[in-house]
Image (spheres, grey):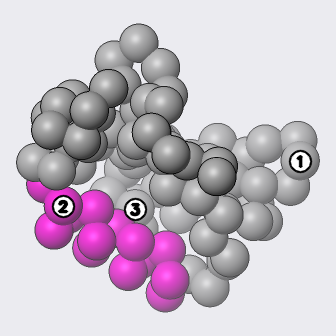
Amino acid sequence: MSRSDPAAFPENGGRYEIRLRGHLDDRWSAWFEGHRLTRQDDGTTTLDCSVPDQAALHGLLHRVRDVGLPLISVTPIAAEGVLQVPGAGR
């Protein structure tokens, strides 16, 4: 996957999994514009979201900041699963 591959880095939007430390109640779904919240057994919450563009993603991340739970990760999701980002984990 190359940096120039638009599917690899959906700069014009796409689907993301945002992972937070701590649990959020379902009522927070409205705060996150109806995106799906899933409480995990490890004490984290995942937010599965689709955004139209990077500005919307940044707006969503500002809401995460406003909630006050620590941000663990933001992972782009391809249609078939998690994207493998070249050079990640080095």
Badge 2: few (under 14), some or many (20 or more) residues near its Cα, within 10 Å?
A: some
For residue 66, side relative to residue 22 (left or right)? left
Is residue 61 on the magenta stretch? yes
Which circle's residue, 1 or 3, is located before the other in the chain? 3
Amino acid of disc 1:
Asp
The residue depicted at 64 percent of the width and 52 percent of the height is 90
State which quadrant residue 63 falls in.
bottom left
- On the question of residue 52 being in view, the answer is no
Q: CA distance from mark 1 to mark 2?
A: 29 Å
Residue matched to label 2? 54
State which quadrant residue 5 falls in.
top left
The residue depicted at 50 percent of the width and 46 percent of the height is 87
Residue matched to label 3? 32
Q: Is residue 13 above or below residue 58?
A: above
Badge 1: few (under 14), some or many (20 or more) residues near its Cα, within 10 Å?
A: few
Residue matched to label 1? 42
Which of label 2 and label 3 is nearer to you? Answer: 2
SS type, badge 3: loop
The residue depicted at 18 percent of the width and 61 percent of the height is 54
Count the marks: how many? 3
Q: Which quadrant of the rendered structure holds the N terminus?
A: top left
User: Which sits in the foreground, 49 or 83?
Assistant: 83
Q: CA distance from mark 2 to mark 3?
A: 16 Å
Amino acid of disc 2:
Gln
Q: Position of residue 61 (x, y in %)?
A: 40, 72
Q: CA distance from mark 1 to mark 3?
A: 21 Å
Stretch of the chain drawn in magenta: 52-66
